[in-house]
Amino acid sequence: MLKKVTLWIVVVVMLAGVLVAQERGGAAGRAGRRDVGRSRQGMQPGQDRSGFMRGGIQTWLTDLEEAYKQNNREKMGTLIAEMKQRFGRMTAGGGRPGSGGSPGGFGRPAGGTRPGQGRADQSFFKNPQMAKDETEKKILAVLDDLDKNQRRGMMNVPVLDGRLLRLLTETVGAKHVVEIGTSNGYSGTWLALALRKTGGKLTTHEIDATRASLARENFKRAGVEKLITLVEGDAHETVKKIKDPIDVLFLDADKEGYIDYLNKLLPLVRPGGLIVGHNINPRMADPKYIEAITTNPDLESLLLHGQVSVTLKKR
Ligand SMILES: C[S@@+](CC[C@H](N)C(=O)[O-])C[C@H]1O[C@@H](n2cnc3c(N)ncnc32)[C@H](O)[C@@H]1O
């Protein structure tokens, strides 16, 4: 396993090197053309907006090096998957302006780049979590501990997706969130962070007894257990018992089951409510689910960073 990971690192680092070199060469070639635009926009000749791209790769390389030193395979795996995804988007779209390549990734955005239109990836926007009060501080500390020490085998959402879930849930003022796929309660704890402010509740479903029991422990540690009902069993069956309206439905279990969860629960999602799907990528998502959320005139769907679908049930 370690050999395989090391091999991947070598391949991926080489790829990253090629990308940087290509971009440097391309940037030099484009420099003359760009300087015309620069002088119109008050930029200095030689000022390079493609620094966002190199900054992204360099940050990624530093993170990878750190994960390697710590022998943190989970983190290495995540970083490699991220690079594969970004590299895939570049090659698929050619990375050329207007080619549709790498929205939000290292390449140029779809629709073309003019000077001043550079798009940043997350490395441009590193911002730590800042607790507003002691309770939030305690919950964030538990989340941080789960992120660092309990990810193995738990298939948890990345930190950013946890933050997104919290943000969406708090924004819609959710009173009832339904989650399919509790695991050890990591995403559920992010949802609870919002629900303690909206006065809402989470009903979360898990088929695996060991993970369900870990989740119960983690909810207690975070002090959010009163906000959460954990339903153990096959969610395809257990969701049939849900009767209350749903403000946010979060799907993060068996991917081929998303369409069944959607069919069963969409009638309960209130107009103005959200359905969030995780792992919505070509490798994992069920085309039937994508079809259902993108061709229904009652729904408005967006795909965020090639991984999370956010669907609004229109009012
Ligand atoms: C990707 S993990 C969920 C991760 C979790 N949302 C988080 O971010 O912390 C998927 C979970 O769904 C559970 N699962 C799979 N099929 C299920 C089913 N039919 N009913 C309930 N849970 C299921 C798995 O046991 C697993 O724990």
Image: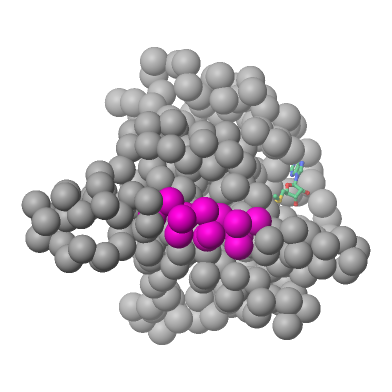
Q: Where is residue 311, by image quadrant?
A: top left
Residue 276 vs residue 57, the one in the foreground: 57
Pick the quarter of the image with the N terminus.
Answer: bottom right
Q: Residue at coordinates 39% horizontally, 78% vertically from top-left?
A: 131
Q: Residue at coordinates 41% horizontally, 84% vertically from top-left?
A: 134
* Residue 45 belongs to magenta span: no
- Percent x, y of residue 151: 72, 67
Q: Where is residue 263, by image quadrant?
A: top right
Pick the quarter of the image with the C terminus.
Answer: top left
The answer to whether residue 286 of the structure is visible from this angle is yes
| Relative to 173, 152 lies left or right | right
Q: Residue at coordinates 56% horizontally, 19% vertically from top-left?
A: 291
- Percent x, y of residue 193: 46, 65
Q: Is residue 131 above or below residue 201?
A: below
The residue range painted magenta reads 15-27
Residue 144 vs residue 201, the one in the foreground: 144
The answer to whether residue 217 of the structure is visible from this angle is no
